[in-house]
Amino acid sequence: MRRRVPTLFGIVLAALAALLVCAPAVSAHTELDSSVPKEGTRLAHTPTTVKLTFSEPVVLPDVHVTTSGKHLALSRPARGDRKGNVVEVAVPKTTGQDRLNLVWQVRDMEDGHPTSGTLTFPLTPKAAGSTARDVGAQAAPTPSEAVRTAWAATRWVGYLALALYVGGIVFVGTLWPQGAQDRRTRRILAVSWTAGLTASLVAPGLQGTYGAMGTLGDAFQTATYTDLLSTEVGIVDACRVLMWVLAAIVLAALLQGGERSARSPGWRVGALAVSLGMLRTTGMSGHNAEGTHPGWGAVADLVHLLGVSVWLGGLTLLLLGVLPRRRPAELSAAVSGYSVLAGASVAAIAVAGAVLAWQVVGSFGALFHTGYGRLLLLKLAVLAAVLLIAQRSRSWVKTRLDIAVLLRGDRATVRPFVYSVAAETGLVLVVLAATSLLVTSAPGR
């Protein structure tokens, strides 16, 4: 087995490299492809309309165009807009200026990320000797860094809560039904549900504010939520909140029924359905649909989130629930069973992560020349360290678990395994932090 592990890792890394080398280009967030008139064209007078063509379909409420601080009216063209990515801007007549500046801003339909820019058209004076006032180019608005930081932190809390809840439910339901009676385990599940619901309620406000390029105070305004709920991103956020509400029913049944509920087929089916719904709605607001094969991206993202949840949630309950009790029967069943489950989870994470990288990064060069790619490399480096520590944990299970069971959970015998699991858990939290930053960053091109 020890000889096979390096070979397996080598195959996975080779497959990842091949996918990245052969990956097709992706469009990432919505950008302005062209305009009519073309930017920089010298005009004899102010145009009545300017036609903007974006790289992806857009809805009018997600597009804003201003000139001299005034919002301009937008409409769809009468023809030539089969994809829904063309917008006509009504431009008011201006006098006494030597250029027309249009500041545009658009929010991506898939994940709510904003992009912006400025179009400048020089204007020729009508008569010789007439004077025109020089109007400098207006800077395009940029998202608030404070809002982005708060959004990333909220996403980290949401990912952590999701992993602890889903992974904890899987661990208790499949490997350790006795944990339903353990006070620490019940507390972990209750706290993770509370944190998950809170994050799912706060995140839409921050996401809507980030997309609208507002301030941190705007994240808690009712109008922000109202505007977001009229978009696809808002509908997904509402569904995520609903799944967390349903998760309360699953948790309440477990807390009331204890071990009997954890062994019940009906409870397990309900917990599985709700957990998959939570994972899917979480992944729908990420970058998995940005590539050329969004179907594969959706499946890979679901598998990736499930693998991380089972891995981290199981690690946490193992560290804080099973090991402190030091009961021989539970150590034998839960630790050995989790070792197999963790191995399957890591394999699923590796394969799904390769597919997601192929979808989102876009090219091998983007790994090194974009912020998204460098952050992904950092995440992979930390993940590699986690796998090395995990290998030490699995080695302990193979060589020392039987001795620990015979010694009835002797503290000195179990201590190396506890340290290894604690280090593994801490580094996985760092991986989740990198994931939160990736979600709020523009993908590689």
Image (cartoon, grey):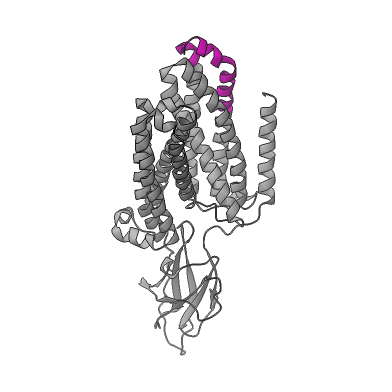
Is 442 contained in the magenta span? no
Residue 137 in view, yes or no: no
**Horizontally, is 201 left or right of 270 in the view?**
left
How far across and how far down the image is residue 301, in percent?
54, 47
Residue at position x 47%, y 31% from top? Answer: 171
Residue at position x 37%, y 52% from top? Answer: 206
Query: As rendered, which of 420 and 98 lies closer to the eye?
Result: 420
Q: Which residues are magenta?
A: 388-414
Residue 223 in view, yes or no: yes
> Which picture quadrant has residue 156?
top left
How far across and how far down the image is residue 106, in percent?
46, 65
> Which picture quadrant has residue 80?
bottom right
Instruction: For the C terminus, give its image quadrant.
Output: bottom right
Is 398 contained in the magenta span? yes
How far across and how far down the image is residue 18, in percent?
70, 45
Q: Is residue 184 above or below residue 407?
A: below
Instruction: For the N terminus, give its image quadrant.
Output: top right
